[in-house]
Image: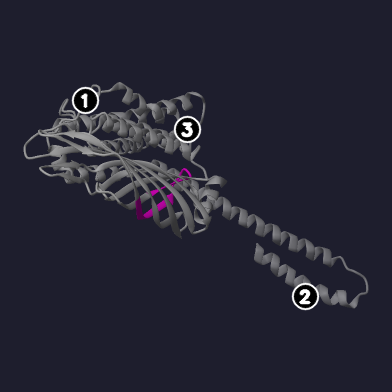
């Protein structure tokens, strides 16, 4: 069509231009040519609109396909937990007994874990559109909870791991944590599209459940990571099988929004935002006291970063971390009560961050600040072993990776090295999962 219009224009120009030159009056052919040009411009505009619509439709189909696919985002929790089960086996097997803090179920911990699931169904009952229609949500939620509970109970029946307080041999894996991450994953899948705060809030609650279970001396760190992996993977499997049964008719199909594009462009330009971190801190874990030694296991770490990009590739960051290290006294075959050493990092970082493809960034940073240690007193047969409270200067460096996820938040990983000017656990390494909300 476009070729025909342009051909007609050339033909009419060939015959009409000489005619206009031989006449002293303005002929109507000039208006005709203007109309032809207008038609060509309108055709070009419609063609471009059709291309845009086609791109949007293709994107929406891909999003629907992704919604119905099996996701593996819980695998890294499982890998981390299984790795810690192997590397910390000697520490976990040592028979020190931690003080008991409540019964094994500790129902208030379940209350915290259930917050995202309760919020999910309150939103649904209030008429807020979710990603699923009621039939899909009910079926997928029931499957996720059944898979999580069944897997947890099966592993507890096979693996005989005592809790830190020695109350029973059902420590591995953590049922509270698997339930908490089922709840957080369901909330994220159903309502994460509304705001990145929905997803980050849900997983923050799940991480708080992990901290409570460690603080109440009911689980080791490997228990809570395997529990988290079971929870996320059970949810993914539940939704995948539900979609195989019900098909796409039970889904409120995702659609491309302008703010989704704006977020990707913003992320590539200046990725300022608030990041929530959850991970593991390892490194120096042994403190010698002559005839006895205090050792810690791999420590559970959580925290937050505040990033301000004053240039597209350069940022300042405020970093905070809270670390819970379970500790035991090792002195031959003697058994002493266990305890906790808590570390708090407060640092200011200079960061260089480079987008290497649309929606993905690598970064490096150097930082300095202070580490606050909340020590503990450990009993020994002849004397007490005192690890003092202290505040010491520290510095370090780190690497990071993050990318924009489907619901406008960034997700990634951070690897940090801390050197503290202290006699206690001075060289430490943090490995964290990152959820970031852009400003």
Q: CA distance from mark 2 to mark 1?
A: 98 Å
Q: Secondary structure at mark 2?
A: helix
* 373 or 50, nearer to the observer: 373
Q: Residue 176 in magenta? A: no
| Secondary structure predominantly adopted by residues drawn in magenta | strand
Image quarter in which the N terminus is found: bottom right
Residue 244 occupies which quadrant of the picture? Answer: top left
Give the residue number, with chain letter if any, for mark 2.
14
Density class for disc 3 (Cα within 10 Å; few <14, some 14-19, many ≥20) is: many
Give the residue number, with chain letter if any, for mark 1.
100
* Residue 147 visible in the shown view: no
Q: CA distance from mark 1 to mark 3?
A: 41 Å
Labels 2, 1: front one: 1
Q: Which residues are magenta?
A: 394-412
* 387 or 259, nearer to the observer: 387
Labels 1, 3: front one: 1
Residue 130 circle label:
3
What colouring does the structure picture have?
one colour
Image location (x, y in percent) of residue 29:
83, 67
Which comes sooner in the sequence, label 1 or label 3? Answer: 1
* Residue 236 visible in the shown view: yes
Disc tally is 3
Labels 2, 3: front one: 3
Q: Is residue 57 left or right of residue 42?
A: left
Residue 236 circle label:
none
Q: Mark 1 touching mark 3, by CB under 8 A?
A: no
């Amino acid at each position: 069509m476009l070729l025909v219009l342009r051909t007609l224009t050339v033909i009419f120009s060939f015959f009409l231009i000489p005619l206009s030159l031989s006449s002293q009056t303005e002929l109507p052919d000039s208006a005709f040519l203007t109309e032809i040009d207008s038609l060509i411009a309108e055709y070009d505009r419609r063609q471009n609109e059709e291309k845009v619509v086609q791109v949007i439709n293709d994107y929406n189909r891909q999003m629907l396909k992704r919604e119905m696919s099996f996701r593996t985002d819980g695998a890294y929790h499982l890998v981390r937990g299984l790795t810690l089960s192997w590397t910390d086996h000697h520490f976990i097997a040592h028979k020190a007994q931690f003080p008991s803090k409540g019964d094994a179920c500790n129902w208030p911990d379940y209350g915290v874990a259930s917050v995202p699931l309760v919020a999910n169904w309150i939103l649904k009952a209030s008429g807020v559109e979710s990603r699923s229609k009621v039939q899909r949500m009910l079926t997928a939620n029931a499957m996720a909870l059944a898979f999580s509970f069944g897997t947890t109970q099966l592993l507890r029946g096979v693996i005989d791991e005592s809790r830190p307080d020695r109350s029973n041999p059902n420590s591995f894996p953590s049922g509270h944590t698997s339930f908490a991450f089922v709840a957080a994953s369901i909330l994220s899948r159903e309502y994460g599209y509304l705001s990145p705060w929905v997803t980050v809030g849900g997983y923050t609650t799940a991480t708080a459940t992990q901290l409570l279970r460690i603080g109440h001396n009911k689980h080791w760190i490997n228990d809570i990571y395997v529990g988290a992996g079971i929870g996320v993977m059970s949810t993914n499997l539940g939704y995948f099988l539900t979609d195989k049964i019900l098909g796409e008719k039970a889904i409120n199909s995702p659609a491309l929004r302008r703010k989704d594009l704006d977020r990707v462009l913003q992320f590539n330009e200046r990725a300022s935002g608030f990041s929530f971190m959850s991970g593991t801190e390892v490194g120096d874990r042994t403190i010698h006291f002559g005839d006895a030694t205090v050792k810690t296991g791999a420590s559970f770490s959580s925290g937050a970063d505040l990033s301000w990009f004053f240039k597209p590739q350069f940022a300042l960051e405020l970093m905070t971390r809270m670390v819970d290290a379970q500790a035991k006294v090792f002195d031959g075959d003697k058994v002493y009560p266990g305890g906790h050493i808590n570390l708090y990092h407060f640092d200011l970082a200079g960061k260089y961050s480079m987008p290497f493809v649309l929606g993905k960034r690598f970064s490096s940073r150097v930082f300095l600040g202070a580490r606050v240690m909340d020590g503990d007193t450990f009993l020994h047969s002849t004397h007490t072993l005192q690890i003092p409270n202290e505040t010491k200067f520290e510095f370090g460096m780190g690497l990071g990776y993050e990318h924009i996820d489907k619901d406008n938040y960034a997700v990634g990983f951070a690897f940090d090295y801390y050197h503290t000017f202290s006699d206690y656990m001075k060289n430490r390494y943090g490995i964290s999962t990152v959820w970031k909300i852009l400003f």
